[in-house]
Image: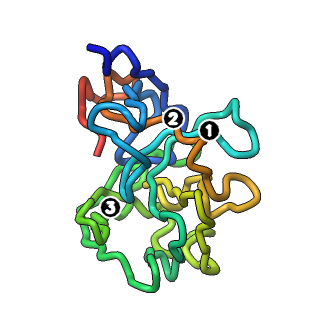
């Protein structure tokens, strides 16, 4: 009961983590360092953190890079420490585009070196703005985060906007979708991967 008492709920305001989290999802967040979440965020964790440039703003993104890691996007593919992260086709996702137009976009399952896997979508295929980047070197005590909606996510790839996340800015890990106001979705108590 003590663990649940220390949980916080957050509303998902953007589609930057589609298909994992949808606009309108209300997620239960377990604080890092308590219960099963001992220590710092792990590679592949979905995490809530305070934006470094505005600590009153909370973001939810996936932890991709740990302190000292080298992260790069090349032709839409994620590279960690020079190794390409395996990505398998996982069907498609019906994305809502501008002017209420829907479009089927590619969905993939990425698998990190620690075995963690999750789905991502590519709205702009592999030619989006952040699909080719310089190499990022994660500073000591910091983490690199990305959204699962790779072409529509404001994340660590934007060093001027989000950048590297200091450990002390992390709030916790989304555990379950308590409920959702997302159109046509039944997501009660869905586990967040």
Q: Are marks 2 and 1 in contact (CB under 8 Å)?
A: yes
Q: Secondary structure at mark 1?
A: strand
Please name which of the two marks, 3 or 1, marks the residue nearer to the observer. 1
Q: Quadrant of the N terminus?
A: top left
Q: Is residue 50 above or below residue 110?
A: above
Q: Are marks 3 and 2 in contact (CB under 8 Å)?
A: no
Taking the image as shown, residue 104 lies to the left or right of residue 116, namely right
Residue labelled with disc 3:
107
Q: Are marks 3 and 1 in contact (CB under 8 Å)?
A: no
The quadrant in which residue 179 appears is: top left
Label 1 crowd bin: few (<14), some (14–19), many (20+), radius 10 Å: some
- Report, in whole angstroms, how far the alpha carbon at label 2 lies from the one at label 1: 7 Å
Residue 56 percent coordinates (x, y): 70, 30
Residue 159 percent coordinates (x, y): 71, 62
Work out whether residue 41 or residue 148 is closer to the camera in this orientation and state it: 41
Residue labelled with disc 1:
50
Q: Is residue 48 above or below residue 97?
A: above
Please name which of the two marks, 3 or 2, marks the residue nearer to the observer. 2
Give whichever of discs 3 and 2 has the lower sequence position: 3
């Amino acid at each position: 009961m003590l663990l649940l008492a220390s949980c916080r709920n957050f509303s998902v305001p953007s589609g930057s983590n589609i298909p994992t989290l949808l606009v309108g999802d209300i997620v239960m967040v377990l604080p890092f360092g308590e219960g099963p979440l001992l220590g710092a965020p792990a590679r592949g964790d979905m995490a809530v953190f305070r934006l470094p440039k505005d600590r009153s703003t909370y973001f939810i993104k996936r932890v991709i890079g740990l302190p000292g890691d080298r992260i790069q996007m090349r032709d839409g593919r994620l590279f960690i420490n020079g190794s390409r992260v395996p990505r398998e086709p996982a069907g498609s996702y019906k994305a809502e585009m501008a002017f209420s137009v829907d479009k089927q976009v590619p969905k993939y399952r990425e698998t990190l070196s620690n075995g963690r896997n999750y789905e991502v979508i590519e709205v702009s295929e592999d030619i989006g703005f952040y699909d080719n980047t310089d190499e990022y070197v994660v500073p000591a005590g910091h983490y690199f985060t990305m959204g699962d909606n790779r072409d529509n996510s404001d994340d660590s790839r934007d060093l001027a906007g989000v950048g590297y996340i200091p450990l002390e800015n992390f709030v916790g890990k989304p555990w379950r979708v308590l409920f959702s106001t997302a159109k046509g979705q039944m997501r009660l108590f869905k586990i967040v991967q």
